[in-house]
Amino acid sequence: MNAKEIKKQFPILDQNVNGNPLVYLDSAATSQKPLKVIEALDDYYRRYNSNVHRGVHTLGTLATDGYEGAREKVRNFIGANSIEEIVFTRGTTTALNLVASSYARANLKEGDEIVISMMEHHSNIIPWQQVAKVTGATLKYFPLQPDGTLDLAEVEKTITENTKIVSVMHVSNVLGTINPIKEIAEIAHRNGAIMVVDGAQSTPHMKVDVKDLDCDFFAFSGHKMGGPTGIGALYGKKHLLENMEPIEFGGEMIDFVGLQDSTWKELPWKFEGGTPIIAGAIGLGAAIDFLEEVGLDNVLKHEHELAEYAIERLSEIDGLKIFGPKKRAGVVTFNLDDVHPHDVATVLDAEGIAVRAGHHCAQPLMKWLEVTATARASFYLYNTKEDVDALVTGLVKTKEYFGDVF
């Protein structure tokens, strides 16, 4: 895989920021978009913009084919059995809220348990807090090991016969930890619980097979994998989705509407009320095409190499602390002595280097790390070792700028 050649397919990366070549190291927040995706969106709006499903005219048919064709691409991309198991959403947050609001609220009661981990993104914490408040269920947390990983022995201890839902992120957006989802799912199922997976940080970077993972629900976002913002998907096992009620009502999702009652369309459309995210789905389909051409195995290998190189180079800087395990995805989170992460990010931005600073929507994890915020560099298929070198040079300048701190 030639990252330098791939980078040429991302127009936004060919620019200067603050007088320096852009070094984009914030793909965990959102990835940049390849020309293939930009052109797919442009083609839809220029050539066949129309609403889907209801029209019989040519543009409507083309739009429907594009939208439903994207659903089939998603199905194949994550290894689902049927398009009935693929619900388009606004993204991971919406998908997880759908599971919490529809499945969990209807199936949990006082005395039941929901188990998540301390490393979760807020999108995989707050929905379960709300479910616990409404149903009387108890929200529990897997403890973390000192390096920010999960220990399966602790998972076994935490999940009990009262556990009904286990929800864990596949990859940590802060630590880069790759969680053993398949093994956790087996423990959950053995105890009669379902397994929900936040796949926002894994789906763009590695091959996902929901059947192999044996998860019951799997959520991800398009914008982190080269697709447009505002589109994502929820995978759910068919028998679970069939027994869930929609949480949004209106056009598109109905079968029959009477004066006092209504019935719903079949899966997956009963969960997609209103005009759907047509352009977003088509763009997501184009992003999947792009990633499959590159190969997810190549992407994963490339990012592991970059993460290893980044840890090696960053470890050369005195006073820099790296958080997370040695073996990780393409995310490196760190702090530079007493320099606030926002100050670090500001100085780096002056050098044309984009990193993320803050709590990364993971305040419980920040508390566990005993920090208020961190800086984060995250890599994707268009990043190179030269980008890492630029980051290291920028951090050395940052350290010199705040030299009075040291």
Image (tube, rainbow, N blue to C red):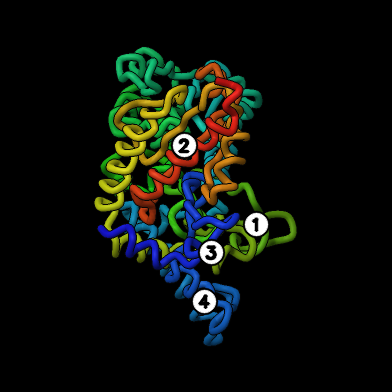
The residue lying at 61 percent from left, 20 percent from top is 136
Outermost residue, bottom side: 58
Query: Which residue in the structure is indicated by mark 3?
Result: 280
Query: Which residue in the structure is indicated by mark 2?
Result: 173
Q: Residues within 10 Å of mark 1 (few under 14, many from 20)?
A: few
Side of 348 relative to 215 (left or right): right
Inspect the image, locate mark 1, and give the three-letter code of the amino acid beneath it.
Answer: Ser
Q: CA distance from mark 2 to mark 4?
A: 34 Å
Q: Residues within 10 Å of mark 4 (few under 14, many from 20)?
A: many
In primary-sequence order, the first of circles 1 and 2 is 2
Q: Nearer the viewer, residue 371 or 389?
A: 389
In primary-sequence order, the first of circles 3 and 4 is 4
Inspect the image, locate mark 2, and give the three-letter code of the amino acid beneath it.
Answer: Asn
Q: Nearer the viewer, mark 3 or mark 4?
A: 3
Inspect the image, locate mark 4, and give the three-letter code of the amino acid beneath it.
Answer: Ala
Q: CA distance from mark 1 to mark 3?
A: 29 Å
Inspect the image, locate mark 3, and give the three-letter code of the amino acid beneath it.
Answer: Gly
The residue lying at 40 percent from left, 15 percent from top is 158
Q: Is residue 44 above or below residue 175?
A: below
Q: Which mark is residue 63?
A: 4
Q: Nearer the viewer, mark 1 or mark 3?
A: 3
Which x, y percent locates residue 356? 55, 40
Outermost residue, top side: 157
In primary-sequence order, the first of circles 2 and 4 is 4
Residue 128 visible in the displayed image: no
